[in-house]
Image (cartoon, grey):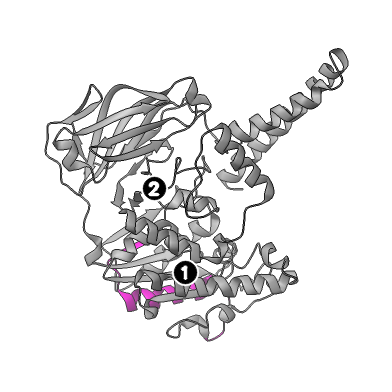
Amino acid sequence: MSRKQQLLKRHRRNKRIGVLIGLVLLVVIGVCVAWWLPFVLGVLAWVAHEAWFADHLFYAPGEDYQYRFSADAQRTDVRLEGGRLRVDSPLEAEATLVLAIKVKSGWLGRFLDPAVEIVDGDRRDRQTFERGVNGLRYLNLSGLAPALMAGELRLRGRFCSLQGAPGLWAWTTPDYSKQRVMVIAPHADDAELAAFGLYSQAENPWIVTLTAGEIEAEHYQHMGLDPVEAARIKGRLRAWDSIAVPRWAGVPQAHCVQLGYFCLQLPAMRAAPDQPIASREADLSDIRLFRQLNPFPLPADLDGQPTWNNLLADLRQLLLSARPEVIVLPHPLLDPHPDHICAQQAVIEALQGLAWQPTTVLGYANHLHDNDRWPMGDAGAGIALPPLFDDTLELRPCSLPLSLAQQRDKAMALGMMHDLQPAPPFKRRVRRWLQRVLAGRAPSPYGENEFFRKAVRRHELFWHL
């Protein structure tokens, strides 16, 4: 069982205990006070839970984030004077900048999301943290070096205060747009969620998607398809998405590849490299149904078997053909999704002993262990660093800014992805309405799926591996 699954299991167990205690108290109130009062209190308790306590947050908001940054960081003295941030040392204009500062929630910040507003003249950003936050947090100031050096950058808390002496780290950010970039996507839409801005600016990008993403096809069952038919049509649609949607960003069709392995089966494939691992829901043990749109043949086309060894052979041919200088893939320690972990492991194994080696490997996290809402805050806002409580990891962030036009293009790319189109369940829509009314959370203007809020941001955040 993964750490994320363990945390979720503990969370659900604690919630069940809390519900049981609450029911006992309501029964006591109904017997001792008035029979109708438990019904009123029960509805109010449910509304309060949905509005303020429904987030999956598997740590205390009062904990300090614990980061240990790479030794090549430029550590710079910085001061916060009257809300204005001042720095004495020069900074590169395109540097990745991270500001550490203690954020303490006010009483309203326990019910409304506390945030730090970053003001540069008429430009404003708002980076949001956990309700009730009271600890060290890390703001992303990338792209703001000129304003910072000019003494024009101001910070102010919204439902929170900034305390203590801040610290600033800076890293040189190369221009990856001039290099050959290959984005590894475990599923269709992972490349767009994590790196649309990066690959849309690259002169020579490749998008390689490992799985068809055919499972969890209930949306298509509602159209009258049986479970197998629904899984197959969903896999075909997502295979199409993985080939077609990158064209929106100008990626040549010859550089878009779908390997067609089966969703959530990569761990089983890795455990038995020679053994074919069939789809969980599509009643298939041949991957070629989902590879028909590829621009050229690959090794696994010969037998169509979903094995780990075939996956490695496919990746080796692609790496030697594309010769990417930059590979972008899931971060194995930050992103807990089992397919994402195996996607990174497959690329690393495929590179072993290969004649071509990349100069840069960047990791991304489309999911987190500890906080299902991260990046917190609204669509279009900046991405603060995620929660981390392990300072044994040495990390080097790389943050790339996205203009408003690039954010809109990214949102349109996500809107083309079939998996992000179905409406959320009724309960989730009710929860979001309550959070909008009672907790002040704004919906994304681009779509209902949560990824439109989380992924369409002022930055794309990566980590050097």
Whether residue 353 sits left or right of residue 372 in the image: it is left
Between 105 and 18, the one lying in front of the other is: 105
Judging by the rendered image, the residue that carries numbered circle 2 is 380
Disc 2 marks a residue whose amino acid type is Gly
Nearest to N terminus: mark 2 or mark 1: 1
Whether the magenta-drawn stretch holds residue 297 is answered as: no
Does residue 310 show up?
A: yes
Between 116 and 395, the one lying in front of the other is: 116
Q: Nearer the viewer, mark 2 or mark 1?
A: 2
Percent coordinates x, y for residue 251 in the rendering: 35, 73
Disc 1 marks a residue whose amino acid type is Thr
Percent coordinates x, y for residue 341 in the rendering: 49, 56
Percent coordinates x, y for residue 355 in the rendering: 29, 74
Q: What range of the chain is rendered magenta? A: 302-328
Seen in the picture, residue 128 relative to 45 is either above or below; the reply is: below
Seen in the picture, residue 382 relative to 203 is either above or below; the reply is: above
Q: Secondary structure at mark 1?
A: strand
Does residue 274 show up?
A: no
Q: Are marks 2 and 1 in contact (CB under 8 Å)?
A: no
Q: CA distance from mark 2 to mark 1?
A: 26 Å
Sort mark 2 into few (<14), some (14-19) or many (20+) by Cα contacts within 10 Å. Answer: many
Whether residue 43 sits left or right of residue 390 in the image: it is right
Q: Secondary structure at mark 2?
A: loop
Between 374 and 211, the one lying in front of the other is: 374
Whether residue 169 sits left or right of residue 361 in the image: it is left
Seen in the picture, residue 418 relative to 381 is either above or below; the reply is: below
Percent coordinates x, y for residue 216 in the rendering: 65, 62
Sort mark 1 into few (<14), some (14-19) or many (20+) by Cα contacts within 10 Å. Answer: many
Judging by the rendered image, the residue that carries numbered circle 1 is 209
The residue lying at 62 percent from left, 70 percent from top is 234
Whether the magenta-drawn stretch holds residue 320 is answered as: yes
